[in-house]
Image: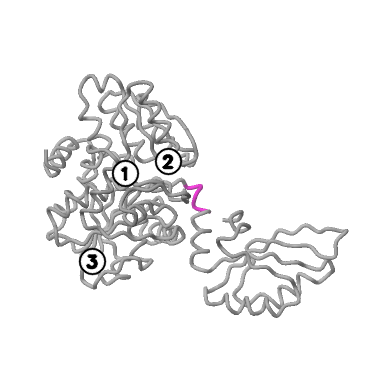
Amino acid sequence: MSFSAEVADAVARLAGVAHRTPLQRNARLSAATGADVWLKREDLQIGRSYKVRGAYTTISRLDATGRAAGVVCASAGNHGQGVAHACAVLGVRGYVFVPGTTPRQKRQRITALGEGMVELVISGDTYDDAAAAAARHADATGATLVPAFDAPGTIAGQATVAVELLEQLPAPPDVVVLPVGGGGLLAGAGTWLAEHSPATRLVGVEPAGAANMTAALAAGHPVELPEIDTFVDGAAVRRAGDLTFPMVRDCGAELVAVPEGQICTEMLDLYQVDGVIAEPAGAMASSALTGGQVTVAPGQTVVCLLSGGNNDVSRYAEVVERSLVHRGLKHYFLVEFPQEPGALRRFLDEVLGADDDIVLFEYVKRDNRETGAALTGIEVGNAADLAALLARIEASPLRIQHLAPGTTAYRFLV
């Protein structure tokens, strides 16, 4: 069966099961870029993610024997919700393995969507840990493994997003920007677009802390990243798929990486300006536009996939923190104060500027020492104000250490 036929089969299977999600023009992104920017709202899909498309397609293709044996998957959260919904609709027993980093909100939704047909298992700290545990379960029980991205049915199911967006526009888009984790979405939608809309420019966006597809393209084959940042949990994958890699390579897609702080800034703009709740992976595509990693020409039609909306509200404090740091507005210092009256007042008068604000101050007085260190967080009014702050610090008689991002001490703060 050709890939186009596989996608057509997936479209037919998903009819009446998955939502046909809206394609909405975004005024903020359009004004910022001069282009005509549209958001494909897969955050409004069942399970608040496009993942149900691939999960249902794969499970619905099982014969009676396969369905009776049950299914198992590994997930950072969204794929698990898709599998859970498919199990509930098709009456198939399933196990969903998730890493401990999966937000509580996603865990709860997996259980709810499964309607008693799935069991949630927490295993390891990363998606890859959960994937290894799911594979062991499949070997031991005979259950069918439903990969999050590296399976023909999954890839074909994700490609149905591209079918929809072409149908929803009066003419093919000039640019389509897609988030990349393991590559299932870009492999499927990218391959389908390359065949049916060859003039469309394809861009895949990875988190800077887990750019596994970029590493694979550089090496010529999938490679395992030695370390990943799991903040963008929906895309924190250590290794690109064996099936997705060659499809991404051959569809002509560009790959860019976006810093996690930029993703957080876009999450906040989506929420505060557009009224859209996006999870970190969901904001990746549009963050590449606002961050400048993807440049588009005025007047072009650009589609960004908003891939998921499963963001636990408890994470917003960290989202705000990472955004402030990324924009150069928040900085941390260790200030060594002499233990004498008036020391703090001199710091406030001589070091802080008019628009500088202390947002963190942790100090313990030691009676048997001449000085005591205070961890101090300072928020500046403008990123450009940092230079003047550092100059005043240099001129101060106090010993002040700037805790720069990337240092060992800084990792305890953010």
Residue at image position (25%, 60%) is 38
Q: Quadrant of residue 80?
A: top left
Amino acid type of disc 3? Asp
Q: Which residues are magenta?
A: 313-317
Closest to the observer, 212 or 302? 212
Closest to the observer, 113 or 62? 62
Residue at image position (12%, 60%) is 171
| Alpha carbon separation for disc pair 1 and 3 | 33 Å
Residue to which mark 1 is pinned: 241
Is mark 1 in CB contact (under 8 Å) with mark 3?
no
316 within the magenta span: yes
The residue carrying pointer 1 sits among few (fewer than 14), some (14 to 19) or many (20 or more) residues within 10 Å by Cα, namely many
Residue at image position (22%, 62%) is 175
Residue to which mark 3 is pinned: 36
Which percent across, then down, holds residue 103? 46, 42
Amino acid type of disc 1? Gly
| Alpha carbon separation for disc pair 3 and 2 | 35 Å
Which numbered dot is residue 374?
none
315 within the magenta span: yes
Which percent across, then down, holds residue 406? 55, 60
Residue to which mark 2 is pinned: 127
Query: Which of the two labelled residues, at mark 1 and mark 2, occupies the earlier sequence position?
Result: 2
